[in-house]
Image (cartoon, helix red, strand yellow):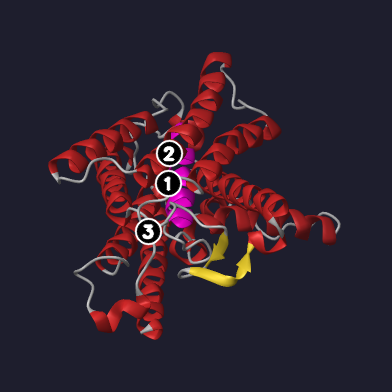
Amino acid sequence: PSHHTKRGTPTMGGIVFIVGSLVGYFVGSYTGGTPPTISGLLVIWMMVGLGAVGFIDDYMKVRQQRSLGLSGWRKVVGQIAVAVPFAILALNFPNAWGETPASPYISFFRDIPALSFMALGAVIGWILYLIWVSFMAVAWSNATNLTDGLDGLATGAGIFTVSAYSLVTFWQFQQRCHTSALVDAYASACYPTRDPMGLTIIAASFVGALVGFLWWNAPKAKVFMGDVGSMSIGGVVVAMAVLSRTEILAIIIAGVFIIGPGSVILQRYYFKATGGKRLFLMSPFHHHLEMRGWPEITIVVRMWIIAGMLAVTGVALFYVAWLAAL
């Protein structure tokens, strides 16, 4: 489509908003009187770790002057290598009330008691838990990577998605268990999330850094985020979903990132099933719209609108679930 005219645009701009997020988090934590927490540091681990996998991919592309960097499987191995330590650490470090950053449950609006990995025993439970977290890390980081196909698209989508998580975690902070500020009538619906304010601060810092980056990344982009940026967004999404106990809800909150990979999967299966026919002119879906003649800015803004609607819907459902738990 239009991307042949964009060669020469600087890439790896994601490094800028990763550094900006780190500065924002540590300054916000210390000035706010809440020193860095294990939960906040785990989000940073996923952001920086998956960003590093993307950086290696970008560096290989730039160094070799070609569009292919890391092979698909090497990229997946790198993503799993980041996710496994995160998952292990997240089930440790209990606070005074025994709350760990993550839990051995699959979660929707909060943990689902019937879906405990440890119900099958500690060994099998740990294996299933590590597979689950690794799957989410690979899925979300590749989804955000695929979405980064038009100027400003992934940046704007990331702003809406992570903003929603800053609201979710701030509400969890307001309604956290084991606090004297909790109204007795609301105690039955409290959240056992560890360090919700730490999660809020890193989410808000990341959003602020993305907003600053969008100034230069909006159409027509002066700089691209590169895989280092798109994968770091995926890292933040999966970390926030796991640590806020909203893993399934993330499908709604971050749903805009599913459109791209979803269209690729549909295209592939439709092509095989029909013996060579294509469902879309090109996949991911935003390139199909380009081939249909849509201006890039129109596609990007409408995707932002979808991202905003999904993020608001996710937050609203989260609040309704809290009301239902009262």
Q: Which residue is mark 1?
A: 236
Secondary structure under tag 1 reads helix
Q: Nearer the viewer, residue 77 or 231?
A: 77
Q: Which mark is residue 173?
A: none
Secondary structure under tag 3 reads loop
Q: Main secondary structure of the magenta part?
A: helix
Q: Nearer the viewer, mark 3 or mark 2?
A: 3
Q: Quick check: is 239 in the magenta stretch? A: yes
Q: Marks 3/2: CA distance?
A: 28 Å
In the image, residue 259 lies at what x, y percent? 55, 59
Q: Marks 3/1: CA distance?
A: 26 Å
Secondary structure under tag 2 reads helix
* Mark found first going from the N terminus, 3 or 1: 3
Q: Which residue is mark 2?
A: 47
* Mark found first going from the N terminus, 3 or 2: 2
Q: Which residue is mark 3?
A: 97
* Res 326 quadrant in image: bottom left
Q: Which portion, as a residue range, is magenta? A: 228-243
Q: Is residue 239 left or right of residue 41?
A: right
Q: Quick check: is 126 in the magenta stretch? A: no
Q: Are marks 3 and 1 in contact (CB under 8 Å)?
A: no
Q: Amino acid at mark 3?
A: Trp
